[in-house]
């Protein structure tokens, strides 16, 4: 197997990249300017040594603490709980939230053998017990696993003087009733807001 | 800008990879096993030094000649003319063709300033004049640029005792008349075959 074929195989392991896209990317790289290709290789090669999880919240960072945990302007009374580090970036991009984060590292999924002890839940409970936190916003995915995890967290946190909330689930903005699936529609009924 | 953000920006320059896919790939790499990530970085980094155009046909190769030109079982009387090196791989994957190739390096496109002299046409004419070649199959894309290039080649080659043909254009197999665009449908009429 030659170098080009090897690269195409590696690239097709990436999420969202099939065999055809991989071939297209490989040929693009062959034509692209060398400086860009070298930089890309360097960025991929050094990614894992430079980036590590933030010891407080589990978000990715190059520094000792992540950019959210080390920012004194963030509201330390709120913690938004997410499944994965990329969820932090997604929520940050809305500009809607100014509190802290906590990355669980996944969701409870008995089928795949992921139980509560595999997630960063103890650490969350410890952070919640330190007295500063007033609200925990659960932002796990609106899936069976995310719902299970939310329920588990709600149970574990209910003894404490902390408000626990969950992101609203319902119709996507700009969406169309006709194309909404039944579950989403049912949830948007249950969570309807008074006008 | 941090390392993760830099990688995401570089990845989103790749064809077919938008900002969201780039973020998804970057986070996948952060979680992927180190051996794979190191290998991918190495494969990208050494791509351009290891792979170069075949001096005969212009296809990509790691060796002196490409795998087609160096294969004695290939039929030297046919040359299939394509725009880009990836077209060679696409045609090879059909298993339909056993002749040689010639990569033009693009198509005539006056709007983008690409004229005949920017393409590897002189080399093709030289190969065609060596006496072995009996048929030249033009497999440029069925676009305005590909058609222009095919016409140009046809004119340049018509004085020689060589058959010049072009890949059939028409309805894609498994397609539906209803969804065919007018131009494709018109071409499939003109190129209809007797049963």
Image (tube, coloured by chain):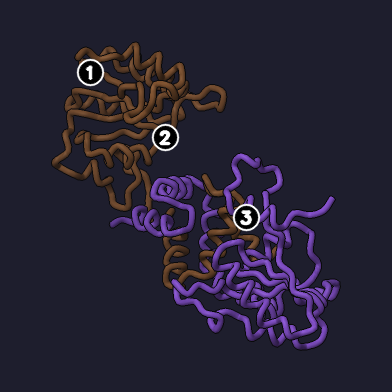
Chain colours: A brown, B purple
Q: Is residue B23 visible?
A: yes
Nearer the N terminus, badge 1 or badge 3? 3
Q: Tag 3, which chain? A: A
- Could you say where residue B75 lies in the image, as x and y percent from the top left? 83, 73
Q: Position of residue A66 (x, y in %)?
A: 28, 45
Q: State whether residue A95 is above or below residue B29.
A: above
Pick whichever of labels 1 and 2 is earlier in the sequence. Answer: 2
- In this figure, which residue is indicated by the disc labeled 3? A9
First along the sequence among labels 3 and 2: 3
- Residue depicted at x 60% and y 73%: B149
Q: Residue at x 35, y 27 (%)?
A: A172
Q: Are marks 1 and 3 on the same chain?
A: yes
Q: Which label number is shown at residue A105?
A: 2
Percent position of residue A185, x then y = 40, 17
Where A70 sits versus A176, above or below? below
Pick the front one: B194 or A95: B194
Quadrant of the image occupied by residue B151 = bottom right
- Left or right, B98 with respect to A71, comes to right
Q: Nearer the viewer, residue B37 or B195?
A: B195
In the rendered structure, the answer to whether residue B133 lies left or right of residue A51 reads right
Q: Secondary structure at mark 2?
A: loop
* Up/down of A14 relative to B112, above or below: above
Q: Is residue A104 above or below residue A42?
A: above
User: Which mark identifies residue A163?
Assistant: 1
Question: Gap between marks 1 and 3, in whole Å?
Answer: 49 Å
Q: In percent of the image, x 81 and y 86: which residue is there?
A: B131
Is A193 in front, or is A51?
Answer: A193
Q: In whole angstroms, how far apart are the C-alphas of marks 1 and 2?
A: 22 Å
| Frontmost residue, B109 versus A48 | B109
Q: Secondary structure at mark 1?
A: strand
Q: Give the distance between the C-alpha atoms of the residues marked 3 and 2, in whole angstroms.
A: 28 Å
Work out whether residue B60 can be spotted. no
């Amino acid at each position: 197997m030659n170098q080009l074929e090897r690269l195409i195989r590696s690239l097709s392991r990436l999420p969202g990249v099939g065999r055809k896209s991989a071939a297209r990317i490989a040929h693009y790289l062959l034509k692209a300017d060398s400086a860009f290709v070298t930089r890309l290789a360097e960025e991929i090669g050094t990614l894992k040594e430079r980036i590590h999880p933030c010891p407080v919240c589990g978000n990715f960072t190059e520094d000792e603490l992540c950019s959210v945990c080390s920012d004194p302007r963030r509201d330390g009374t709120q913690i938004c709980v997410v499944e994965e580090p990329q969820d932090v970036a997604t929520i940050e991009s809305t500009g809607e939230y100014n509190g802290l984060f906590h990355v669980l590292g996944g969701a409870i999924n008995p089928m795949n053998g992921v139980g509560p002890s595999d997630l960063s839940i103890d650490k969350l409970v410890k952070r919640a017990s330190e007295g500063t936190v007033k609200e925990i916003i659960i932002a796990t995915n609106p899936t069976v696993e995310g719902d299970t995890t939310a329920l588990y967290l709600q149970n574990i946190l209910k003894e404490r003087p902390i408000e626990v909330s969950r992101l609203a689930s319902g119709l996507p903005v700009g969406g169309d009733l006709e194309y909404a699936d039944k579950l989403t529609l049912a949830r948007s009924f249950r969570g309807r807001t008074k006008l």
